[in-house]
Image (cartoon, helix red, strand yellow):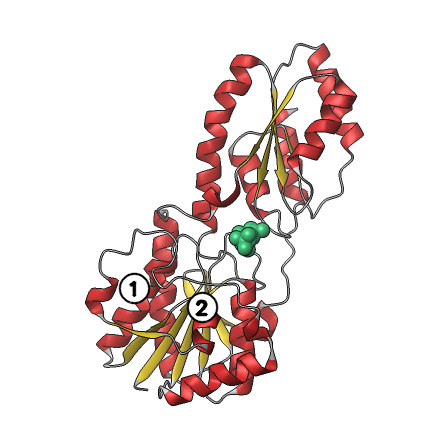
Amino acid sequence: MKKIAIITRDCAGVNAALRAVVRTANKHHIQTFGVIKGYDGLIDSKFITLNRSSVSGIVNLGGTILKTSRSKRFFTNDGQKKAIKNLHKNKIDGVIVIGGDGSLKGAHRLAKRTKIPVIGIPATIDNDITGVDLTIGSDTAVNVVLDALDKIRDTATSLERIFLIEVMGRESGYIAMQVALAGGCEEVLLPERKSDIKTMCEEIKQGNAKGKSSWIIIVAEGRAKAHDIARDVTFITGLETRVAVLGHIQRGGHPTGVDRILATKLGHYAVEILRTGKTDVCVSIKNNKIVTIPLSRATQRKTIDVTETYKLIKLLTK
Ligand code: F6P
């Protein structure tokens, strides 16, 4: 193997993975090329040479230094043909894709349509990759939300208010569930669990009658819009509500230690596995050991079992 290309999406820890890929590959005398703007860059043949010094000082940076895109073109036959042609034209003999569900689906398509080995590294704040316990970026996202939540709680307590905090996770309640547990929140609304707003409001009314004066309710974006829930809560309980939609602050920022370590190990492993000629898999860590998961499986949406954690959240706050 002489030349590998790296395609990235953005979330905290992606740069740390990129650094590990480049430096591991260079140690094996493999040249490394970054693809600018994700799959769009592959279609437009936008490659840059990466070496040891191009990835220095990035282990702590959020986002991706390669920039990225949500490429619609790549998910067409024509786009994929152009992308593969560019890989051959540039004599690329290995590809590493760092990203979430969409990126890994793209990696799977590439692996199916070419003989060039393709390895995925799961990186998404949603932590929704099947077979993967923890994706790069999700620990940072949980910590970013907890930091915001702790600050919001100060006002919620001081002003005796009900706060609804909307957190990311397109179809996944992972961030919501983790922060509700770690932040001591009274309620969490998840896409994975049916919940009745009227019952929740009844609980609030009863609590309020006994003297409880503030609530923090986490709303996963995949479940509902926090503004809509807030309107219903005020209507049913007659109590004042406030909303905070945290949005993209959850995807950026300096990666936590957990994410940097995970990204560094997975980046290193991905190169080692690519060198063996293995393809169409993504790498992950289980019981401190590297494992590979077929991309066909990894890209089937993961659903988390929220039952036990939800019970614990309620047990500790009721
Ligand atoms: O998949 C990661 C994620 O951050 C989701 O949690 C969120 O719903 C989505 O991406 C937002 O996408 P965009 O940045 O394209 O608006």
Q: Pointer 2: what residue?
A: 38
Rounded to the nearest angstrom, the CA distance separating label 2 from label 1 is 17 Å
Residue at 29% of width from left, 55% of height from top?
59
Amino acid type of the residue tagged 2 in the rendering: Gly
Q: Residue furthest front?
A: 44
Residue at 48% of width from left, 81% of height from top?
83
How packed is label 1: few (under 14 Cα within 10 Å), some, or many (20 or more)? many
Q: Residue furthest left?
A: 53
Q: Is residue 260 above or below residue 225?
A: below
In the picture, the quarter occupied by the N terminus is bottom left
Q: Pointer 1: what residue?
A: 19
Amino acid type of the residue tagged 1 in the rendering: Arg
In the rendered image, which quarter is residue 34 located in?
A: bottom left
Left or right, 271 with respect to 249, comes to: left
> Is the shortest distance between ligand 1 and the CB of mark 1 under 8 Å?
no
In the picture, the quarter occupied by the C terminus is top right
How packed is label 2: few (under 14 Cα within 10 Å), some, or many (20 or more)? many
For mark 1, give the secondary structure: helix
Left or right, 307 with respect to 81, comes to: right
